[in-house]
Image: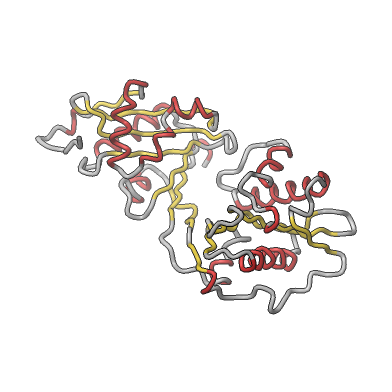
Amino acid sequence: MQSGNINGENDRIQVRPYRPEDRSGAERLLEACGAAGEVGLLPESERKNGSAKDARAWTAERAGEVVGIALLRQKTFHPHTGYLAIRRYPDERGGHAETKLMEALLAERPRMPLQTSFMPGDAPGAEFYERFGFAETRRTFMPALRLSELQGGTGASEPAVGDRLRIASLAELAGNGEALNQIAERARDSYRATHTFNPPGVHPLSVWRRLIEADDVLRAGSFAAFDDADGSAAAFALLHGEEGGSEAELGWLGCAPGQEKAMQKVDEKRMMFCLRSGFDTVSAEIDTTDFYQYPLLERYGFPPSEPLLTYFRVPASRE
């Protein structure tokens, strides 16, 4: 059941901390908002799966019915920022529910940096968040490209990478702990360089190893270039998907300073792998702040896609 904003009852909206008994009402609300996937962000779900350092929520109620919810969590991987999502029933107009939720959240967590992401047509949207001091920090494009329409270079004009560099796939490097550690270090440094607004925490190298060797990484289609002089990873390109599947996803890409040509080479090799392995489509998730990946949108001729907008709020004490 949706709740309309009628009879001048705006002032009767009450905001309080979320309780486990609110779950059924929260689930109905999130489903009505087209955000059923966020049920997993409810505090008891986050605590169960262990993906968050902390998870909180607040509900906005009218006459005992949940008409809005604010979900806030601190990720273990990104522990310095609170990830925020505010949802209300589509017919809950006037902005009162989300305003009261934001006010309650900021009153309790005034010094926490906050990040939220939403599509251009979502409500609440940019105007609402800007009113509370948020500013756009990036856009994330999630296009898909049919490989039959691929544009750009995939080996026809291979960049020179130098005599001191050798290239190998992660499959070829299986069991080579030293080489995989080098790739993990390069992935860590590249990720930090592209996530300056909301940097990751300080994690042991084993965490980054697990990320580059995740179950969905296609090791035969992920490549790294190494400097033979010191054994360091000059560049890397990861590919995700399933063997025999129809779609592959471009993963992390990065390089050491001055090794852009090596990065272009390993990127081309993963794209050639996609072509030779019979994939129909290649997808990607590319941020405007990712100076390694962003040029691929134009290079390979990805079709336009509506971006996910990310807004960030720096608390007054940190400005």
Q: Is 147 on the left-hand or right-hand side of 58? A: right
Residue 203 occupies which quadrant of the picture? top right
Q: Residue at x 55, y 73 (%)?
A: 150
Residue 284 occupies which quadrant of the picture? bottom right
Q: Is 174 on the left-hand or right-hand side of 156? A: right
Say if 105 sits above or below 314 in the image.
above
Say if 49 sits above or below 272 in the image.
above
Say if 177 sits above or below 284 in the image.
above
In this view, the residue in front, 37 or 173, is 173
In this view, the residue in front, 143 or 215, is 215
Q: Is 256 on the left-hand or right-hand side of 319? A: right
In this view, the residue in front, 262 or 117, is 262
Q: Tell me which colouring the rendered structure shows.
A: secondary structure
Q: How many marks?
A: 0
Q: Position of residue 10 (x, y in %)?
A: 18, 34
Residue extending farthest to the front is 244
Residue extending farthest to the left is 7
Q: Position of residue 100 (x, y in %)?
A: 29, 33
Q: Position of residue 223 (x, y in %)?
A: 72, 58
Q: Residue at x 19, y 36 (%)?
A: 3
Say if 172 sits above or below 155 in the image.
above
In this view, the residue in front, 85 or 239, is 239
Residue extending farthest to the bottom is 156
Q: Residue at x 53, y 59 (%)?
A: 247
Q: Position of residue 248 (x, y in %)?
A: 57, 58
- Of the 4 image quadrants, the one containing the N terminus is top left
